[in-house]
C-alpha cells in the first residue's frame, strides 16, 4: 500500500487535471433550457423563461451566492410564500454583473404559463416544482454558465469543462 501511495504522489503532477465532482448549471437562452451537469452527465433538465430582451439576462460564467426558500420580493414588498410573489418558491441567486446574488437568479414563478418564453426582467424563471428540485441539487458556489447558443448542451458542458481545466494551470 505504501508503494502505491508513493508512486501515486510521484505521478500526480503528470496526471491530467480534471473536474471530477464539480457541477455546473447551464442556461441556454436560445433554447430556454436549464441543465445541471456533473461529471459529463445530465442530472437535471427543465424549460425556463428568460429576459424580454437579449441583454436583460446576462451571459457568462457566474457562481451561486444565495439560496432561499420562499424568497421575499423586495421590489414590491411581497413576503415569501404569498401567491402574488413572482419569485415563486425558491431563489438561486448568482453574482452576475458584479452583484451579490440578490439581483439575478434562477427562481420559481407564480406565472407558469411564462415558461419557455422571453418575458422576464433578466432572471431565469422555472416552474416551482422544477426550481425546487434544482435548489436541492446545487450547493452555493456552483458555477452557472449562461449562453445564447445553437450548440448542443453537451458541447456547452465541454466548453465549461475546458475553461475550468485551463484555470488549473
Image: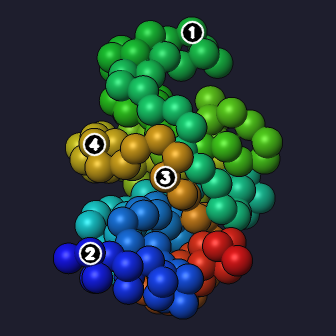
The correct choice, above or below, for 152 with respect to 36 in the image is below
Of label 4 and label 3, which has the lower sequence position? 4
Q: Residue at x 42, y 64 (%)?
A: 22
Quick check: marks 3 and 1 in contact, CB under 8 Å? no
Report the residue marked by disc 3.
142
Mark 3 secondary-structure assignment: loop
Report the residue marked by disc 1.
77
Q: Which quadrant: the N terminus?
A: bottom left
Of label 1 and label 2, which has the lower sequence position? 2
Quick check: marks 1 and 2 in contact, CB under 8 Å? no
Report the residue marked by disc 2.
2
Tell me how far mark 2 sits from mark 3, CA to CA.
Answer: 35 Å
Q: Position of residue 139 (x, y in %)?
A: 40, 44
Q: Residue at x 41, y 63 (%)?
A: 23
The correct choice, above or below, for 90 with respect to 49 in the image is above
Of label 3 and label 1, which has the lower sequence position? 1
Report the residue marked by disc 4.
136
Q: Is residue 97 visible?
A: yes
Q: Which of pointers 4 and 3 indicates the residue nearer the eye?
A: 3
Amino acid at each position: 500500500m505504501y508503494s502505491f501511495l508513493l508512486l501515486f504522489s510521484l505521478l500526480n503532477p503528470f496526471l491530467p487535471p480534471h473536474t471530477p465532482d464539480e457541477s455546473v448549471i447551464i442556461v441556454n437562452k436560445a433554447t430556454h433550457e436549464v441543465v445541471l451537469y456533473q461529471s459529463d452527465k445530465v442530472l437535471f433538465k427543465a424549460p425556463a423563461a428568460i429576459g424580454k430582451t437579449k441583454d436583460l439576462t446576462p451571459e457568462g460564467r457566474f457562481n451561486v451566492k444565495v439560496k432561499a426558500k420562499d424568497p421575499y420580493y423586495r421590489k414590491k414588498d411581497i413576503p415569501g410564500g404569498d401567491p402574488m410573489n413572482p419569485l415563486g418558491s425558491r431563489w438561486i441567486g448568482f453574482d452576475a454583473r458584479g452583484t451579490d446574488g440578490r439581483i439575478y437568479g434562477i427562481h420559481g414563478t407564480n406565472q407558469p404559463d411564462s415558461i419557455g418564453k422571453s418575458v422576464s426582467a433578466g432572471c431565469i424563471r422555472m416552474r416551482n416544482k422544477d426550481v425546487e428540485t434544482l435548489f436541492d441539487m446545487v450547493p452555493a458556489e456552483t458555477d452557472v454558465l449562461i449562453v445564447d447558443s445553437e450548440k448542443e448542451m453537451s458541447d456547452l458542458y465541454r466548453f465549461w469543462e475546458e475553461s475550468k481545466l485551463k484555470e488549473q494551470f
